[in-house]
Image (cartoon, grey):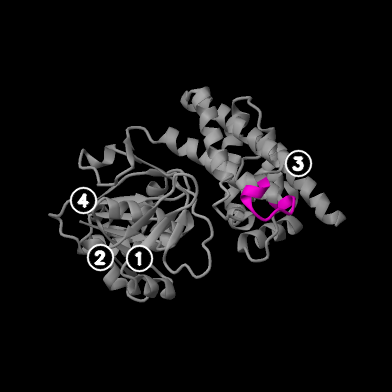
Amino acid sequence: MKAVHFGAGNIGRGFVGLLLHEGGYDVVFSDVADALVDAINAADEYTVHEAGPGGTDHVVTGFRAVNSRTDPATAAEEVASADVVTTAVGPTVLRFVAPTIVAGLALRSPEAAPLQVMACENAIGATDLLRREIAAAAGDDAEILLTRAVFANTAVDRIVPAQPAGGGVDVTVEPYFEWAIEAGPFGGALPSIPGAHFVDDLAPYIERKLFTVNTGHAATAYFGARAGIERIADALADPAIAANVAAALEETSAVLVAEHGLDPAELAAYRATILDRFRNPALIDTVQRVGRQPLRKISRHERFVGPAAMAAERGLSAEALVAAVSAALEFDDPADEQSVELQRLLRTEDAAAFTAQVTELDPEHPLFPVIRDAVAARQDQLTAD
């Protein structure tokens, strides 16, 4: 069995690639970073270190890498003969992955079992997005080529911090992970992924993860950055920050109860587990790494505005989530392109235009004026400075 995984970074090697290896697949990593592809091909094995209580080491073998930028033909050939294709590249990069998958599907025998495609991204419906990008890239051939694949959405969760220098292709991760996959598209022929669980309805899992893990992680980063704290674990050690993050997650849990009927007690336990994971002192993670790409993180269907909008529509509180958005508006990292663009837009757009453009909220939405006022407050602060 063979799996092609797009994105040979830390999540690709330390989470998705590891589980595919443990499922018996030969793993082909596809990436566009020359040095990373060369380093993977120079290694016979790599180790995934689980840092923290209960952690262990896992040795990964039976892998190789291909550079889809310099050798697209080989990448397409690997896709053509694969059983599974996965991604961990970021939702905005899926459109660049799609042409390689299209080329692979064009080479794939119509008699072969359907290629099992799963986008493992921090976004709702990421595989649906990838499928649309593949259809667009295929053009007139889309109808035929799409019959050669099946597409399943997933919800993935594992903290993979910035890696220590000199680690090569080894990866440090937390012991905890969750990989939920919708079962229906596979028609009973499920991929072999130990530790993953296949579910009939993925929506509760996706939103529980996105609105708890991702909301909490980013909120910790933005409140921590505001306080001048470097590490995520240290930020949560600050009682005020911990209270702000906990309040935001209580609001997202209320939305999850209203939307999906999830059990409040189980959500409270889940929140506690998540916060304990963030406090793991063995994970050296920084607020700068977690806070990067703020424009995406305050967009309409992401971790703050998404649940806050759902709360506002239901007459539930979104005060703590809006406070997290306010902290995100202060995130100023010259090394992060989106942070630079965020600060530029705050200085050049009026509050209403900024809110409409960045959050994509309709001006008539009940959350719109609240976010607009938070934006205006940040702009007043910038003017005063």
Image spot of residue 104 (x, y percent): 26, 63
To which residue does mark 1 refer?
Answer: 30
Q: Is residue 227 magenta?
A: yes
Nearer the observer: mark 3 or 4; the answer is 4
Q: CA distance from mark 3 to mark 4?
A: 50 Å
- Look at mark 4 in the image and give the residue it sits on: 114
The Cα atoms of the two marked residues, 2 and 3, are separated by: 51 Å
Q: Label 2: few (<14), some or many (≥20) within 10 Å?
A: many
Which segment is the magenta one? 225-235
Left-right relation of 348 to 117: right
Q: Nearest the camera: 198 or 99?
A: 198
Q: Which mark lies nearer to you, 3 or 1?
A: 1
Q: Are marks 2 and 1 in contact (CB under 8 Å)?
A: yes
Queried whether the magenta region covers residue 110, the answer comes back as no
Which circle's residue, 2 or 3, is located before the other in the chain? 2
Q: Quadrant of residue 181?
A: top left
Residue 78 got which mark?
2
- Real-space Cα distance between discs 3 and 1? 44 Å
Q: Amino acid at mark 2?
A: Glu
Q: Amino acid at mark 4?
A: Pro
**Quarter of the image with the C terminus in it:** bottom right
Q: Which mark is residue 373?
A: 3
Disc 4 on helix, strand or loop?
Answer: loop
